[in-house]
Structures are given as structure tokens and as C-alpha cells.
């Protein structure tokens, strides 16, 4: 009898074009979770995924409503004692495509150019969801699957998964699993299979500064009121010292330091200064003094201005003092920082530093703590083995700088560990114009996932 693993692999190879066509159908729908303008696209994407699961023979397929966007769930359960259950996590929402004028191809018209598929979400993470669906399709087509499979695909990851912890609490029995397969991370390079074992957390805020009641003529009033744009910038400038350290009171108190051993491991990763210079195109690197770029990304917290808005920014000139200014400020957190504590630290900083010449308001947005996963979990080893089979080398284990709130929530609320992987590359322009997916790596990823199911299940 043919080995079902080989049957599944050859099915995948024969259906590579159909897999790609399905991915394109997903990328075509502008499922941007952050603005209500895209509510219909969100629902369409969720329904598209639910139909796909039904087509694969999944049961209990449904769109579970939340206060925000629905969660797609479905399961394929084999009544075999001892069968393990893999819960595959995904998100169907994407980041806004703006600024549109910087895209070389329209963001929601998936376009293949040589080895890459361009489009918003192609890499983060419709490509990863489609790869998981493709691998599952191939496995199911080869007979009874070696594991029970559940899919849970949310629509709010890119806005910090604000309603997901409630969903996990309300649906614990339905979500029961031995492990979560989370392909929302990525690879270091096309020839470097990668498993992620740590993620940073996130605390996100909008800071508003109000000055005069309305905009003012800068000649008639300039020099007698504190310009709110200037006041905001002064506050922001005071948040770092010249060594790149963050000056919120107590910010580093609960930061878990990296061990000497871990720093030695990180030093072996191919994430050199040159790697970051090439990836970013910045004239020079910048960061917390005393740490390498790879350490800064994986193991150190940050504070970033994500956007800033005030006054006249149109063509030409206008002599005006704006009445308000606003900045979006976020912090990447490491273990054991608590997002609530960081919120209080930011309030304390503002209370101490904000001048009496302005009023300020701080709005807290969703986020979550950092997470660590067990690199020796049997499912992580099954994935490592699968990647080695496909790429011919053992994957590198790394800490990732991005955030995926569900990983810590799965551990805390349901006690389920995650295996973090993914087949996107650092140069995929995720969250930026011209997002793309490297298709040869994506196809290898599908094969690796097929191996993973058999390695873990048998
Ligand atoms: N897939 C990313 C996170 C990621 C990127 C992990 C690259 C590993 C490698 C995810 O979709 C994402 O961007 N998350 C947001 C979460 C936030 C809004 C809470 C992030 O990190 O900014
Ligand atoms: Mn993602």
C-alpha cells in the first residue's frame, strides 16, 4: 500500500496551481479589520474560509460572532483512541494597504511577478492560512488523517485581538487540543527554515495634546501660546535617553534579562548588522546601547512613534498654530512586562512631564504580553523534523520581535502550547506597500506542513 504521506505530497504537487488560485481569491478580498468601511469584506472572507472548510469535509463549521469580527471554526475529528488534536490558528484580517500610491500593483489584485505573489495579506497571513488549508486538503485526500484537526481563524489579530480572550474562555471545550499550530511567524531567509520560540508583547496608545481652543494665526498669537505640536514632540523626545533607553518610570524593572547562554545562541543567528542595514535601507542602525540588533529585536523592549499628526500638512504654506496634536505610540514588550503596568508608567510619565500649557488625553488600545513557547514540545520537534526533511537542514530557533496576542492567551486561558512557524520572509514587506509572498518557499512550507502532521501523529 502506498504510504499516505507520499500520496498527500504528490496530491499537493499536482494541485499547486489550484492552491495558488485559492490564495489569490483570499487576497482579493480587502479584509482590513481596523476600519468599519471593510465590514462586508471581513464577513465575505470569513464565509469564504468557512465554505472551504465545509468543502474539505469539516464539521461544526461556523462563524462565531464576537463584539468585533467573527471567528471561523471547524473541526475534522477521527474517532480513534489516542489520536492527538492539532488546533490550527490563523487570522483572516490584514493591515490597511495605505499609502496606496506606493504600491506597484494594486494591493487587492493579487499579481504574480516571477517567483512572488504581490498583494496585501499574501504573506501576513492569508498565504499561511492557505498553506495550512492546502496541506490539510492533501492529508485528508490521502485517507484518514493522522491527527484530529481544528481550525480557528480570527478576524482581529492586526488590531490586537481585543475580543479573543473572551472567545477562548467561552469556547474552551470546543477548542480543546494537544497543541496549537500557529503559522503566523516567519523564516529568516528562503534557505533558513525557522521555528520561533518567543514573541514580544504590545501595548498601544494614542496620545492627544490640546492647546488653544481653535487654530490660531501664528503671527497674531505665535509666541504667547505653547504650540501643541511642539509640546507633543517635547514629550515624545523625553521618552528616550541618548543611549536609546526608555525613560518611563520603572520601565525596565520587570524586564527579564537574557541569559549569557541565550545571548550566545542569538549571536549565532545570521541576523547581523548588515542584515538589518540591507533589510531596512536606513542610513545607519540605531538601538539600545549594549545590545546587538538581534538582541534588541528578540529580547529588549521598545517604544515607537507609529504616526504623528498635527496642523497644516497640505501643499504650500499656511501660517497657523494648530489647536491639537496627536501621536500613536506603541511599545514592544518582553517577558515579564505587564501591558497594564506599562500603561500606568506612561500615565505617570505624562503626569510628571506634561507642561501646564496643554491638556493631554491618553487612549489605550488592545495589545498583550510577550510569550515564550517550549522549543522541545513534541509538536515543535515534529515540525523541526519536517523542515529538515524539506530544506535539508535543521531549522534555526529564534525569538521574534513581532506580536501574536493569542499565543500567551492560549497558554494562560486554555493551557495549550503553540508551535510557531510560517513561510514568509523578512523582505516580504508585511504591513507595508508591496507586500509579497515568495512562492517557492510557500510550496516548501506546504510540504513541510504535510510532513508535520504525519510526524506528530504517528
Ligand atoms: N504575523 C504578524 C506578527 C509576526 C510578524 C510574527 C513576523 C513573526 C514574524 C502579526 O500578524 C502581526 O503583525 N501582529 C501585530 C500584532 C499587534 C497588532 C498586537 C504586530 O506584531 O504588530
Ligand atoms: Mn500575521
Image (spheres, rainbow, N blue to C red):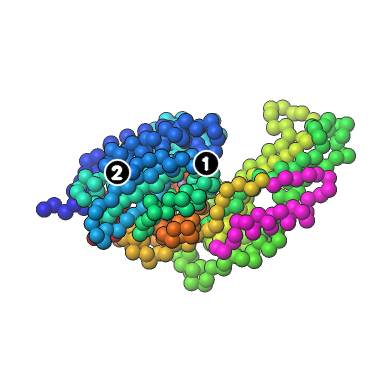
Magenta part of the protein: which range? 335-362
Proximity of marks 1 and 2: CB atoms separated by less than 8 Å: no
Residue in the picture at 60% in, 52% down? 203
Quick check: can you spot residue 388?
no
Residue in the picture at 50% in, 50% down? 166
**How far from the left and from the top, in percent, is residue 105?**
45, 31
- Give neighbour class at mark 2: few <14, some 14-19, many 20+ (Cα, 10 Å): some
Nearest the viewer among 35 and 74 is: 74
Q: Is residue 232 magenta?
A: no
Q: Residue furthest bottom?
A: 260
**How far from the left and from the top, in percent, is residue 190?**
38, 50
Where 56 falls versus 193 (above or below)?
above
Left or right, residue 413 beside residue 78: right
Q: Residue furthest left?
A: 1
Residue in the picture at 71% in, 43% down? 208
Q: SS for tag 2?
A: loop
Residue in the picture at 59% in, 61% down? 337
Marks 1 and 2, how far apart in space? 25 Å
Residue 411, label in figure: none
Residue 58, label in figure: 2
Where 18 falls versus 392 (above or below)?
above
Nearest the viewer among 446 and 187 is: 446
Give the residue at mark 1.
67
Amino acid at each position: 500500500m502506498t504510504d499516505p504521506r507520499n500520496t498527500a505530497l504528490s496530491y499537493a504537487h499536482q494541485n499547486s496551481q489550484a492552491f495558488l488560485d485559492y490564495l489569490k481569491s483570499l487576497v482579493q478580498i480587502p479584509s482590513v479589520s481596523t476600519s468599519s468601511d471593510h465590514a462586508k469584506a471581513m464577513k465575505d472572507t470569513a464565509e469564504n474560509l468557512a465554505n472551504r472548510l465545509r468543502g474539505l469535509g469539516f464539521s461544526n463549521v461556523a462563524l462565531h460572532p464576537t463584539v468585533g469580527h467573527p471567528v471561523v471554526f471547524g473541526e475534522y475529528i477521527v474517532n480513534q483512541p489516542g489520536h492527538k488534536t492539532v488546533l490550527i490558528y490563523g487570522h483572516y484580517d490584514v493591515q490597511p494597504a495605505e499609502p496606496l500610491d506606493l504600491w506597484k500593483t494594486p494591493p487587492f489584485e493579487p499579481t504574480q511577478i516571477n517567483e512572488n505573489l504581490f498583494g496585501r495579506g499574501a504573506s501576513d497571513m492569508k498565504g499561511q492560512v492557505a498553506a495550512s488549508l492546502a496541506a490539510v486538503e492533501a492529508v485528508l485526500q490521502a485517507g484518514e488523517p493522522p491527527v484530529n484537526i481544528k481550525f480557528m481563524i480570527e478576524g482581529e489579530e492586526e488590531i490586537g485581538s481585543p475580543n479573543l480572550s473572551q472567545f477562548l474562555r467561552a469556547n474552551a471545550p470546543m477548542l480543546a487540543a494537544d497543541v496549537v499550530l500557529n503559522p503566523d511567524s516567519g523564516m529568516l531567509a528562503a534557505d533558513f527554515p525557522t521555528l520561533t520560540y518567543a514573541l514580544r508583547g504590545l501595548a498601544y496608545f494614542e496620545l492627544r495634546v490640546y492647546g488653544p481652543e481653535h487654530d490660531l494665526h501664528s503671527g497674531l498669537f505665535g509666541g504667547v501660546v505653547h504650540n501643541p505640536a511642539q509640546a507633543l514632540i517635547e514629550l515624545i523626545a523625553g521618552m528616550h535617553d541618548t543611549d536609546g533607553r526608555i525613560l518611563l518610570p520603572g520601565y525596565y524593572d520587570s524586564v527579564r534579562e537574557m541569559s549569557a547562554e541565550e545571548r550566545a545562541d542569538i549571536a549565532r543567528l545570521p541576523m547581523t548588522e548588515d542584515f538589518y542595514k540591507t533589510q531596512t535601507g536606513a542610513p545607519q542602525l540605531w538601538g539600545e546601547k549594549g545590545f546587538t540588533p538581534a538582541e534588541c529585536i528578540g529580547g529588549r523592549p521598545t517604544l515607537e512613534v507609529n504616526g504623528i499628526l498635527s496642523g497644516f500638512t497640505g501643499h504650500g504654506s499656511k501660517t497657523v498654530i494648530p489647536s491639537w496634536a496627536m501621536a500613536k505610540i506603541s511599545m514592544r514588550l518582553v517577558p515579564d512586562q505587564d501591558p497594564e503596568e506599562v500603561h500606568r508608567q506612561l500615565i505617570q510619565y505624562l503626569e510628571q512631564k506634561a507642561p501646564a500649557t496643554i491638556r493631554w488625553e491618553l487612549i489605550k488600545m488592545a495589545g498583550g504580553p510577550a510569550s515564550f513557547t517550549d522549543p522541545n514540545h513534541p509538536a515543535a520537534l515534529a515540525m523541526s523534523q519536517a523542515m529538515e526533511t524539506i530544506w535539508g537542514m535543521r531549522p534555526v530557533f529564534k525569538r521574534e520581535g513581532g506580536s501574536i496576542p493569542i499565543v500567551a492567551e492560549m497558554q494562560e486561558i486554555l493551557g495549550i502550547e503553540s508551535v510557531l512557524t510560517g513561510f514568509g520572509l523578512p523582505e516580504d514587506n508585511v504591513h507595508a506597500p508591496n507586500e509579497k509572498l515568495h512562492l517557492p518557499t510557500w510550496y516548501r512550507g506546504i510540504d513541510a506542513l504535510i510532513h508535520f502532521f504525519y510526524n506528530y501523529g504517528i
